[in-house]
Image: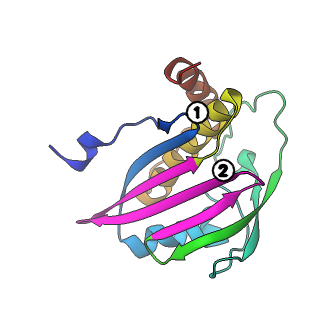
Amino acid sequence: MTDSDLISAHGTLIEPTTLKIQRLLPGRIDRVWSYLTESDLRRTWLAAGEMGTKPGSSFELVWRNNELTDPPGQRPEGFSGEHSMQSRILEIDPPHRLVFSWGEEGKVEIDLESRGDKVLLTLVHHRLAERSTRLAVSAGWHAHLDLLVARVSGATPTPFWDSWTGLRAEYDRLLPT
């Protein structure tokens, strides 16, 4: 059995309000780390924003999802062209672990582990209290991490919004009500 066989394509709730999602990425761990921490690389799959290197450093994530893929796909009603959120680094251990606040309440942990010529990325998002938030965030992380896989692999990604919309419907079926 390979690492790929053990990783579910979808995130799972490991607690009622905690999502865990994993991806196996090609390349060296330091390259994947750069895609997490360097604004110019992170903006190609998630959000821009200069990030400090010490616990307690605050930073702003700025999403421009229409710029992630060409074409971007059909943006769902109610989503703006740009969204930002203040965050703070809670823990950082380059190039293995990054933990940051998600707005006022949430917390995101990202761990990287070398697996031969690949890197296992494990993301855990805590404190997703409302089901609607769990659905949106699950679909969002899934779509964004698939985009990260495409970026580090040199593959052509699926239009972001079309991917997110389809995944939102899948998570609505998969996650408990």
User: Could you say where residue 40 lies in the image, as x and y percent from the top left?
Assistant: 65, 70
Distance CA(mark 2)–CA(mark 1): 12 Å
Count all numbered tags in the image, as a single digit: 2
> Magenta includes 100?
yes
Residue at the (76%, 54%) spot, across then down: 103
Disc ID at residue 20: none
Label pair 2/1, CB-CB below 8 angstroms: no
Amino acid type, callout 1 = Ser
Q: Which is nearer the eye, 122 or 128?
A: 128
Amino acid type, callout 2 = Leu
Q: Is residue 4 left or right of residue 125?
A: left
User: Could you say where residue 100 lies in the image, as x and y percent from the top left?
Assistant: 63, 63
Q: Residues within 10 Å of mark 2 (few under 14, many from 20)?
A: many
User: Could you say where residue 51 lies in the image, as x and y percent from the top left?
Assistant: 68, 74
User: Could you say where residue 158 lies in the image, as x and y percent from the top left?
Assistant: 54, 38
Residue that numbered label 1 is attached to: 163
Where disc 2 sits, the SS reads: loop
- Report the quarter where the N terminus lies: top left
Residue found at the far bottom of this picture:
54
- Is there any visible trace of residue 139 in the rendered image? yes
Residue at the (55%, 33%) spot, across then down: 16
- Is there any visible trace of residue 43 in the rendered image? no
Residue that numbered label 2 is attached to: 68
Residue at the (68%, 40%) spot, across then down: 72
Where disc 1 sits, the SS reads: helix
Image quadrant assignment for residue 104: bottom right
Q: Is residue 26 above or below residue 29?
A: above
Q: Is residue 52 above or below residue 97?
A: below
> Magenta includes 154?
no
Q: Which is nearer the eye, 104 or 156?
A: 104
Q: Residues within 10 Å of mark 1 (few under 14, many from 20)?
A: many
Q: Which residues are magenta?
A: 97-125
